[in-house]
Amino acid sequence: MSQKQSCCFLGRVFQLCSSKSQDKTKKGSPTPSRSSMDYKMAGKDNLLQPSFPALNSQQRLSDAKARNKVELKPGRSLMDWIRLGRSGEDLTGVGGKVLEVDAEELAKHNQINDAWIALRGKVYNITPYMEYHPGGEEELMRGAGIDGTQLFDEVHKWVNYESMLEKCFVGKLKSTPPAHRRVSLLRTLEPGGPANTNKSLLKANSTESKNGPMSPPAFKVPESPTLPKFDWFQTKTTVTLVVYTKWKSMKSDFVVIDKQGNNFLATLYIEDYIYYLHIELAEAISLHYEVKVNTDNGKVDIILTKESEKQWPSVGKHLQKHNKTVKLKDQEIKYRTCSVDSVSQVTHDSKLLCLSLPEGTRMCVPVGYHVHLQHKVSGMEVVRSYTAVTATLTGEQDPRVKDGSVIYLMIKIYKNGALTPWIDSLSKGDPVEVSTFTGDFSEDRLSVCQNLVMFAAGTGFTPMVRLIHYCIEDTKSRVNLKLVFFNKREEDILWYDQLQSLAEKSDRFSCDYILSEADSGWSGKTGRITLDLMKASLPQQTEKSNLLICACGPTPFTNLVTKFAKELGYSESEYHAFQG
Ligand SMILES: Cc1cc2nc3c(=O)[nH]c(=O)nc-3n(C[C@H](O)[C@H](O)[C@H](O)COP(=O)(O)OP(=O)(O)OC[C@H]3O[C@@H](n4cnc5c(N)ncnc54)[C@H](O)[C@@H]3O)c2cc1C
Ligand code: HEM
């Protein structure tokens, strides 16, 4: 998933060529279960080219989500940006003076060679950052000359801009009169009165940001979702907190619990908002929590075990966040200090890390979701994303994952990378800042599909681990799974032995390995992703094939899979690209 890897994928797209003689004893031999075309299909017609959706159908894959990282020039990596920041060069463009900038002045700096952006009331000179921006100059220019807070948050709220742009700080943004007018209106109109003032201010500011400082004021009373109903009851040994979410896709993984002493916070992720239960519990409870969800009606039971078997007079005192909702997009990114529980080598350059969450925290990362790790590198806070995996693909699972007390991450180390050299240095007991999970994959898609075909390149394998595990573990699942796994060399293949062993054990799973820099001992497939390869890897499609295609890898790889899926006529409902 590195820029380097990206260059390779962009540079040469080879035709797939399979060696004629397949030596089953060698690595790279196709997995023994089934051939790539040997799918059990639901429909009768076996059309090679899908006829649905029609060529001009709205359901076809659109480019709307094509919002990607770009290939940066050599010498423009994050490490290079950190070095530039430390070089002593004036990156503010104003000689390091702290200015007061009004909207009119800000708007003048909207050129690629003279660009300022306002983020949460602070103005930064982003001109020197242009070539270092992983999203590209064009994207960054969308925020030039305006208050880019909302835009920034919509794209990548987790990015630590304050630290990254510290040396580019120009000054403070002067607030404009229309903003004051809107704030005072909101204060009068929003229910909740003075206690809600801060919230109102924040929302008013974000309306301002969206329209840019020069736009006419667009007044809108902020919407908030209907509060779910909360109730509780107790038995001799337990206290159950009940939340009626009415959301049928609710999962127990969407409930995160943090407890310090008797201070209890349950954060429920319900569709596009967050609901909190925040209580100073009346009595002590044990650290084991059980979360049950009724998927018929979205009812959530959080079962707490009493430390002593006495009757509670009440559940406790409601604290600041209790019974409140926040829109998901407005949530603050929360980091918890975890500690390294174990580290093991997966391949020559990849490691499996088990991280223990703080005592009292329960966080089960949903299938296909990732977390951010944050660490200061040469004075700059660096944030990187990592997808949660399982402890193993085939062996006995670590029960602590289901309890939400540990998470596993599989991480490739780049010797010259910004964050991974530090990850490489970690050992048992070391602290690591880990964010709450984030992601956009819906687990429900796995229960409705019959054929799951995963295209993964390098560490793009990590989201597939949970997908495979989910479908194989679920004894009721009849999903046929195929992994098409692209790597440079044989030694780069993550969990090769486990994949082979799974393919031998399960008649529902098969795996194809494709190497771009294979050595002479490799008898398997070589090349890169092509339209023909993709077509050959997918089951012959009919309208009822209930296919799900997933892709993850360096941006150019994922872009190609997306493009080919589109060319083959697959719709958005049949495709998911994980960011990588
Ligand atoms: C949603 C998501 C999930 C992810 N999940 C995982 C995961 O599960 N496991 C995993 O290992 N990774 C994952 N990643 C990637 C991860 O977030 C980091 O990008 C990766 O670990 C690299 O971090 P780094 O800071 O050490 O390296 P970087 O500093 O980003 O450098 C990586 C490599 O690219 C080279 N490079 C960087 N910029 C340039 C340039 N301009 N020109 C030439 N070369 C350059 C560096 O020299 C280095 O070799 C995920 C990414 C996303 C977005
Ligand atoms: C407000 C205007 C901006 C827009 C529209 C924008 C857009 C984007 C896009 C499209 C990406 C790639 C896709 C993605 O990672 O999700 C990206 C990545 C990134 N941007 Fe921006 N960006 C903006 C401002 C900034 C600023 C001011 C910074 C300063 C620090 C920044 C830092 C980054 C970083 C570090 C990444 C890589 C994130 C990662 O690795 O996950 N961006 N941006």
Image (tube, grey):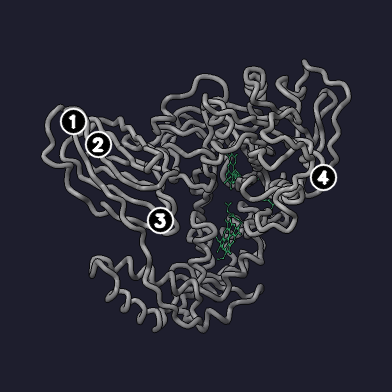
Question: Is 7 on the left-hand or right-hand side of 547?
Answer: right
Tell me which label, 3 or 2, sits earlier in the chain: 2
**Measured along the vertical axis of the image, is residue 96 above or below residue 452?**
below
Neighbour tally class for label 2: few under 14, some 14-19, many 20 plus, Cα within 10 Å: many
| Residue under pointer 2 | 240
Q: Is residue 522 above or below residue 528?
A: above
Mark before the other along the chain sequence, 1 or 2: 1
User: Tag 3 or tag 1, which sits nearer the N-term?
Assistant: 1
Q: Residues within 10 Å of mark 4 (few under 14, many from 20)?
A: some
Q: CA distance from mark 2 to mark 4?
A: 57 Å
Residue 281 percent location from the top left of the image? 19, 41
Q: Are marks 1 and 2 in contact (CB under 8 Å)?
A: yes
Looking at the image, which is closer to me, 391 or 443?
A: 443
Q: Secondary structure at mark 2?
A: strand
Instruction: Report the mark closest to the observer, 1 or 3.
Output: 1
Does 391 sit left or right of 130 as displayed? left
Disc 4 on helix, strand or loop?
loop
In-front residue for pair 154/571: 571
Q: Spot the residue most to the front.
A: 44
Q: Which residue is mark 4?
A: 13
Residue shown at 83%/21% (left/top)? Answer: 22
Note whether residue 162 is visible. Answer: yes
User: Residue at horizontal 53%, vertical 31%?
Assistant: 470
> Looking at the image, is mark 1 or mark 4 nearer the viewer?
1
Q: Nearer the viewer, residue 192 or 573?
A: 573
